[in-house]
Image: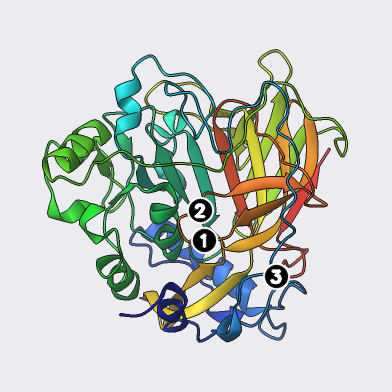
Amino acid sequence: MAGTYMERKQNIKRTIPITHMIRRPIRLVLLAGLMLFVSACFSALASTPLPLPPTTTAQSTLAPPATRPATESPIRAGAIGPEIYPPDVNPLTGLRVDDVSLLARRPVIAKISNAPPLVRPQAGIGAADLVFEHYAEGGLTRFSGVFYSNMPQRVGSVRSARLIDYELVPMYQGLLAFSGASIGVEEYINTSEFADRAYKGVLFGLPYYWRDENIPVPHNMFVNLEALSQLATQDGVNTTPTLRGMAFLEEAPPADDGAAHSADIRYMATRVRWDYDAASNRYLRFSDGEAHLDANTGEQVSAANVLILFANHRFTDIVESVFQDNVSYSIEMQLWFEGEGILLRDGRQYRVQWRRPTRESLISLRTIDGENLMYFKPGNTWIQVVRPPEQQDSNTEWVRIE
C-alpha cells in the first residue's frame, strides 16, 4: 500500500455494478426478510448504470481542480475562523469551552450503528460535535461521530469502520474508535498515517470497550471515549491537533435560498427528517418517523446546523460481507476537492460549495458561486452524506426541503 494518497486510492478503484449494493449479513432471523426485500429492490435497478456527476472526472484520472483566483472575500465582523480561533473556542463548533485542556487532545471518530432498529436509541450520539451519516450496505446508514469537546463514557453501539473513515480520521487528526473492519478496509487503516491511532474494539477490554449482555451480538459493543483518550495519551499519540477551515457566525448570513422548516432526506432503506424548532433555533432529528433520542440523556438529538453534502459514490472490490451468495461491496465516498451541498441553519437554507483541497483539510463552505465564505452557526453540525441528484434513484432517494 506504499505510494501517494491518490496512488493508494487507485488500488481500490475498480467499479462494481449497483446490483452488488446489498446489505451486510444479519444474524438475527427476524431481519432476514427485510434484507431479501432490500436486495430485490436493488436488483430491480440492475439495468440502470450508476452515472457520474458532470463535474467529476473518472476515478482513474482524478486530478485537483484548476487553481483558483487569489482574491479572497473579507471575513464578516463577529465571525470565528476559518483560520484563527480564540484559544478557548472549539474550532469544530465555534463555541467556548470551560476547560481549554480539552482542546489539547485529539478528537475521536467513533463508528456508531444505525441498523437494525434495536440499536436505537444510540448512546452518546447527541454529545458529538459533528456527525456524518453515510451509506453502509443495503441502503442502510451508519454514523461517524466526531467527539472533541465531550468524551462520553458510554458511546455506541460501536460497529466496523468503512472507507469514509479513511478520509475522516486524517481530516480531523483524530483517534478512530471502531469494532473492526473488513480485510480491505483494515488494510487501508493499518497502512495509513493514523494506524497507531486506530483502536480496534475487539482487541481491547474494559475500561475501554465492553459488550452489553442485554443487547444481542454484534450490536452490543460500547466504548468509553474518556478512557480511550487517556489510553492514547499513555501511548504518546494524543497530541494537540491543528484544526482549521470551519467559519462560524452567530448572525444568519444574508441571501438565503428560502425557508427550511423541515428537511426530508430519504436513503434507500432509511429515512431522516429534521424539523426546525423556532424556540431553540435548532433542528430536531427524526429517524424513520420517530424522534431520535440519545440513550444517555433521553433527549431528542438536535443540531445547530444540518449540512446536506452531495458526494460522488463508487463501489469498490472490497468485500464487506457475503450472505446467501449475495456479495456486499464497500462504498467509496469521494470527500475530496469540492462539491455542492445545502446548509440548513436558523430555519433557512443556503446552497453552498464544499471544499476539501488536501487530505488534511477540513470541509469548509463557500457560497454557491464560490466567491464568499459561508458560515456555520456556532454549535454542533450533522452532515448528511448523500449521492448527487444525478446518481440518485428518485423512487428510493431524495432530499426535500420545505
Mark 1 or mark 3, earlier in chain: 3
Left or right placement of residue 190 versus residue 352 in this view? left
- Residue at left 38%, top 53%? 169
Q: Which mark is residue 399?
A: none
Q: Nearer the viewer, residue 291 or 382?
A: 382
Residue type indicated by callout 1: Thr
Whether residue 151 can be seen here: no
Rendered location of residue 146, percent (x, y): 42, 41
**61 w.r.t. 153: above or below:** below
**Label 1 near label 2: C-beta < 8 Å?**
yes
Query: Which residue is label 1 attached to?
Result: 358
Query: Which residue is label 2 attached to?
Result: 361
Rendered location of residue 231, percent (x, y): 15, 40
Mark 3 or mark 2, earlier in chain: 3
Q: Rounded to the nearest whole Å, what is the CA distance between mark 2 and mark 1? A: 5 Å
Q: Residues within 10 Å of mark 1 (few under 14, many from 20)?
A: few
Q: Which mark is residue 66?
A: 3
- Residue at left 47%, top 19%? 96
SS at badge 1: loop
- Residue at left 60%, top 28%? 80
Residue 376 occupies which quadrant of the picture? top right
Left or right placement of residue 48 versus residue 101 in this view? right
**27 w.r.t. 226: above or below:** below
SS at badge 3: loop
**279 w.r.t. 41: above or below:** above
Q: Tell me the quarter of the image containing the N terminus.
A: bottom left
For discs 3 and 2, the disc positioned in front in the rendered view? 3
